[in-house]
Image (spheres, rainbow, N blue to C red):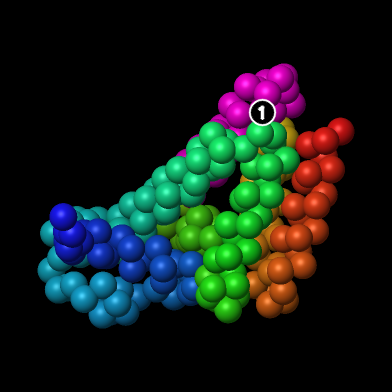
Amino acid sequence: MNTVAGPRERLIRSAILMMREHGVAATGLTDLLAHSKTARGSIYLHFPGGKSELMEQATLHAGQQLGATIEALVTESSSPAEVVVGLVGVWKRVLETSSFTAGCPIVAAARSDSPTVQAASATVFADWTRRLADYLISTGTDSAAAASISSVIVSTIEGAIIQCRSAKSLQPLDDAGTNLVKLLEL
């Protein structure tokens, strides 16, 4: 059965796409409504807190999507290095298919003026770090090292995505992946 997304889902999807390309501040309500093909009243019906609540929910939703990708990579990979290679591959595809216009919506949320949107980004980054740390622990890494290494993985990949967009090159992600794999193989 093929179901059509309702206004709430369309607004969240549009917010994620627009955040990835323009950031939170540059994503206006009028543009969101046009992109999502949603009536103006839908924003306040589904997000009584307005744009800030919509962006918070979009951030958490985007975080869950990549969290599910991390879980799939952890399940399918035979080593932490393979997980890193998989994450780098995911972001390379995003950058290539968007001609370097789409970045990480969680970074966009972190730069928001809204404390609730920033808090949502912190929650997402903490979740990704925890998921990676749990996997590292399951492969024999001690918990303190796993927490630190997983934080470095998230920070390095996120920084490389920003550099890739700026340079319109995948080289920063390639470099990040190569060096993270070396770190994990020590």
Residue 147 visible? The answer is no
Q: Does the magenta stretch include residue 139?
A: yes
**Picture residue at 76% right of the left edge, 55% below the top:** 176
Question: Residue flagged by tag 1: what amino acid is it?
Answer: Leu
Residue with the mark numbered 1:
136
Residue, x 17% and y 59% (percent of image)? 3
Quadrant in the rendering for residue 128: top right
Per the rendered image, the range of residues in magenta is 119-146
Q: Residues within 10 Å of mark 1 (few under 14, many from 20)?
A: many
Instruction: Please tell me whether mark 1 sits on a helix, a strand or a loop.
Output: helix
Residue 25 belongs to magenta span: no
Q: Position of residue 50 (x, y in %)?
A: 25, 61
| Residue 39 falls in image quadrant | bottom left
* Residue 156 in picture, x, y percent from top left: 71, 51
Residue 151, position in %: x, y? 67, 39
**Residue 96 point in image, percent of width and height:** 60, 72
55 lies above or below 180: below
Asked if residue 32 is positioned above or below residue 162 in the image, the reply reads: below
Q: Quadrant of the C terminus?
A: top right
Q: In the image, is 12 to the left or to the right of 152?
A: left
